[in-house]
Image (spheres, rainbow, N blue to C red):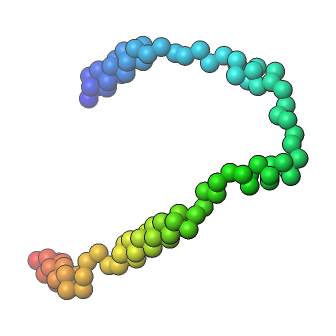
Amino acid sequence: MLLRQFIMLTAFAGLAHCGTIPDVGGTSADAARAADFPELVAIDSLIERSETIAPQITPASIAITNDRIAQLRNRAGALRRPVVDQATRARMRAAIARAALR
């Protein structure tokens, strides 16, 4: 048992030296601190811009989503049903009772 642990420890130590450790210096945090603040924009201009973009929610996407919801609800309902039917459950209980009497 001790030999197996020693071999595993040696293997893991060997694998640890296989990869290179990336440089995780603070360059991204430094860049974020040096960056300018985002431009503040009036909400009206955002609303105007959003009205020119084609809507992503369409009757077709709503129908697809509703179909998916119905499928998931049916699947959830099937998962709530008993896994073992009553007849099989009765046979299993009878077998357990017979085994307990031995």
Percent of width and height locating residue 87: 19, 86
Look at 52% across and 15% down and name the residue there. Answer: 21
Above or below 28: residue 84: below
User: Residue at position x 76%, y 20% from top?
Assistant: 30
- Which image quadrant: the C terminus? bottom left
Q: Residue 89: where, in percent of width, then height?
A: 23, 81
Taking the spot 32% from the left edge, 78% from the top edge, the residue there is 82
Q: Percent x, y for residue 69?
A: 48, 70
Question: Splitting the image into 4 quarters, where does residue 28 fall?
Answer: top right
- Position of residue 77 relative to residue 19, above or below, is below
Left or right of 69 on screen, residue 6 = left
**x and y percentages locating residue 50 in the rendered image:** 74, 52
Q: Is residue 33 left or right of residue 86?
A: right
Could you tell me which residue is drawn at 75 percent across and 21 percent down? Answer: 31
Tell me if 93 is positioned left or right of 19 in this view: left
Can residue 93 be seen at all in this image of the molecule?
Answer: no
